Amino acid sequence: MPTLTRAEAATRASLVDVESYHVDLDLTGTGDTFRARTVARFRARPGASTFCEFEPAAITSITLNGQPVPHTAVTGGRLALTGLAEVNELVTDATMAYSNNGEGLHRYTDPADGSVYLYQHLFINNGGRVLPCFDQPDLKASFRVSVTAPADWTVATNGQLVSRDGGRWEFAATERISTYLASLIAGPWHVRTDEHDGIPLALYIRATLAEQLDAQAPEIFEITKQCLDRFHEMFEIRYPFGHYQQAFAPEFNFGAMEYPGLIVLRDEFVPRSTITETEREHRAGVIAHEMAHQWFGDLVTMAWWDDLWLNESFAEYLGSRVAAEATRFTGTWTTFAIHRKAWGLRADQRPSTHPVAPSEVADTDEALMNFDGISYAKGASVLKQLVAWLGDDAFLAGVNAHFKTHAYGNATLADLLSALSKASGRDLSGWAELWLRRAQVNTLQLEARRDGDVYAEVALVQTAPEDFPTLRPHRIGIGLYDHAGGAVTRRELIETEIEATGRTVLPGLAGARAADLVLVNDGDLAYGKIRLDDDSSAAVPLLLPLLTDSLARAVIWASVLDAVVDGERPVAELVTLVLTALPAETETVIVEDVLRATRGLVDRYATAETRPAALDLVAQAADRLVASSEPGSSRQLVAARGLIGATLDTARLRAWLTGAAVPPGLVVDADLRWLILYRLTVLGAAGVDAIEAELAGDRTASGEQWAARCRASLPDPAAKEAAWAAVVGDASLSNRLVELTAGGFWQPEQRELLEPYVSRYFAEMPGMMRIRSGMSAEKTALAAYPTVMVSARTRELAAELLARPDLHPMLRRVVLDNDDDMRRALASS
Ligand SMILES: [Zn+2]
């Protein structure tokens, strides 16, 4: 679909006021298309001309206010509308194309049973792929949907089902919602239903995962109910969209999407193999996140994508918070500290960094690229800090006033700030300017000057990057830890507000007995790059495993990993710390994240000579974790996954595949088998025959995806050529299969073989961007980037591509950011 600019949207909003859409879909055809008849009712400035988004495969008829409109009025994904009356009725009858990239009406065939499933994903500008519509967030309308489909299907939409007669479904009109929030699923879905507090609940999944959903539905329903209760305690407006349905859909581009009344989540959230506690916690966080959107995003929607953060930062903050407060997953802030925040900090230091709330997002392409670590994780960190500053009562009072004023409408940053200011009595304009309007991140470094065993002075030094010289106020915790008798205890936690200055002397510490470890950002309230003082850093290897607070350990690990990324510490030091300190780690999410991040850093920061030894140490650490875990535990499984990814011991991996010498309690199920096989294919210890044999026993969606990834990873010229051709040129391949093929392609073990593909990336990606669109194109460009080919030559090629004026903005951003990551890696090696 064509990009919509901010200016076009503003002009159109001044001309048009949309009342309703009635969409009547016929999904009974067997080809690549479906029939859509739509009646759109809207008011307009009389005599005005404008357009709506519309991309039919073939047009049967178009009428505006009863008069036929020539088919030539549709060009480039837009239908020109001229001579508008005050009250208008647009009626279209057209053939529309299904998609295979997760946008529009995505059509998926389950390889296990041949069943067809459809889901609609109109976000961010794909409304015209299903119906003619004014596709921008501030032109809300009521949607009424009718569907004709095979009689043995299940169909669901945002609206409630009014009647069903054989293969004909009629749904009630929705409240006023934005076009990007109109949702629909259709197919032989397996359904589970429940009810809570007067709200009907439903879960949907494809039939081949029915058994898994049945096993996990009690937990999913329980979390849904707990979160609904918590939101009802916090918010004065009850859940506003009738029923609460959650569909787990195949090949979904996002983790999930907050469609009012019919949330869609990727079906990987209901895995067929063993599910870890980390994965369960993540799912609970996503359920809470999408529920938060029902208010932040769906009930009150940003006017334009400038205020995307009003959706995502709030949902990210409330998702972590409500999951921690209302469900058994009380450790979500530890996950946030080690995992999500690192994502935000990295994004914030790349060339593409932008403010949490940019004053102007030019078009829908730019908006799509802003669904990044800044809009989610940085924004949520900043909100967490704001709530600590305002106090929870004032924060919730402001938010509730905001909902009340703008329900079923749109709002901006200024609207929210004025509600929060009113409720708290504090002027937020200075805070918003520094935290929401300015990009980049501060470093917070502790300086502890000693006089023998006591402190002469302890200060927190705040710095900013040269190009972004903003210093900020921070609310931050400083923990003083003592080491005695084999234990580390927190003597004191100082929670303090520091000003937007370079150096703050911490009060009350001069003359105090020096601590064995001072933890900056204890409690993880602040958003910044955290650096410990020299003595504390030196004490980390010994003391880190003895800290009893998982959040404190997460803050330290995140700081250490960040210092390696910046080249302040060698990757060899990190690997040694992993070997000495990680095997004692009890928090599964920390084990998982540190193993994954370390592995990534070894791939990019170690040289060809040092890499095997570094990997071996990571594998040893993982091995110790496996051995010291309770058999069958999540910790054992994530450690085993880490071990499989790092080990060079192919004989051991082969043995596990045959069931020999498997650690007690570790279940080598379908997905773990594939992970082992993937490692063997990367190392050249298993070939195409082994992949096909595994696939023959696993003709499922997961099996197909794993096979695609394994084939791409083979150290074989013909396999590489086939995989590359698929990534850059095969538009028939679905979004998920392309991503996984690209994801298996680059392997640090195969640098020699892969060398010719570095220049091909830069030569051929512009063409790939022409055959794929939206998020699928962006994800493919990202997954196919030669991140492991760290060299000056790769950077030169990137610079040449970036010099091309016609470069697609999404590809430009991918190359710019990845090249900057490579700059750091090169500088440190
Ligand atoms: Zn979200």
Image: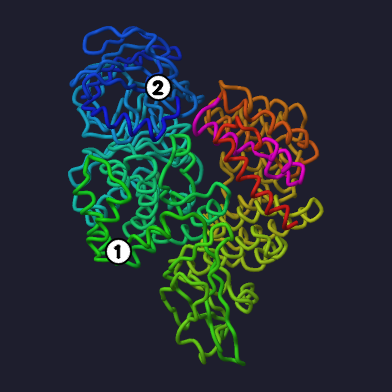
How far across and down, in percent of the image, does residue 544 sit? Answer: 58, 72
Residue 799 lies in the magenta-colored region? yes
- Name which residue lies at 75% across and 49% down: 648
Answer yes or no: do the residues labelled 2 and 1 have beta carbons within 8 Å? no
> According to the image, what is the colour scheme of the structure?
rainbow
Position of the N terminus, as image quadrant, is top left
Magenta stretch, main secondary structure class: helix
Is the residue marked by circle 1 packed among few (<14), some (14-19), or many (20+) residues within 10 Å? few
Q: Quick check: 519 left or right of 5?
A: right
Is the residue marked by circle 2 packed among few (<14), some (14-19), or many (20+) residues within 10 Å? many
- Name which residue lies at 44% across and 30% down: 208
Which residue in the protein does label 1 denote? 427
Outermost residue toward the front in this view? 47
Q: Is residue 339 visible?
A: no
Residue 700 lies in the magenta-colored region? no
- In the image, the segment drawn in magenta is 772-801
**Element at badge 1?**
loop
Rendered-image quarter of ligand 1: top left
Q: Is residue 112 visible?
A: yes
